[in-house]
Amino acid sequence: MEKRTRHKSQDSQLKYLVDERAISRRVGLDIGHPIRVFNMGGLGLDQDRFLREMAPTFSLLSVDEYLMKLAQVNFLKKCFPHAREMLDQLSLIDCERS
């Protein structure tokens, strides 16, 4: 597993696991747009408290149909690896019309 390094962005006190500068160095390309990978601790949030206080609201959220269909397609790819190419051609865009 890749080792994640924690660092502070020059323009922020938030701790990011990785940002566009680190990605740019790794892939050898200039990335001009911000990319921030972070966790709750890096944002100064207590993860356990957040989950404890926010968990009851999760049941109020509607199901994300795109993510559900994507998960179904990924499951089929795992079960039927020989059909991966055909499954890659399935359009998930129709979920956006719902």
Image: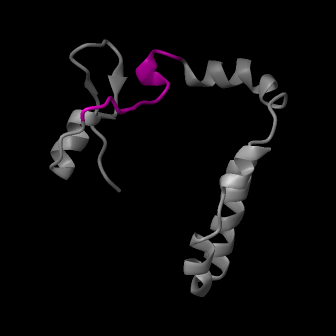
Residue 70, quarter of the rendered image: bottom right
Residue at the (31%, 42%) spot, across then down = 4
Residue 20, quarter of the rendered image: top left
Q: Is residue 62 above or below residue 44?
A: below
Q: Position of residue 45 (x, y in %)?
A: 52, 17
Q: Position of residue 97 (x, y in %)?
A: 75, 45
Residue at the (24%, 38%) spot, across then down = 31
Majority SS type along the magenta span: loop
In the visual, does 4 lie left or right of 52? Answer: left
Q: Quadrant of the C terminus?
A: top right
The one of 27 and 86 positioned closer to us in this rendering: 86
Q: Position of residue 66 (x, y in %)?
A: 70, 49
The one of 73 and 93 positioned closer to us in this rendering: 93
Residue 34 within the magenta-colored segment of the rendering = yes
Q: Position of residue 21 (x, y in %)?
A: 21, 34
Q: Which residues are magenta?
A: 32-45
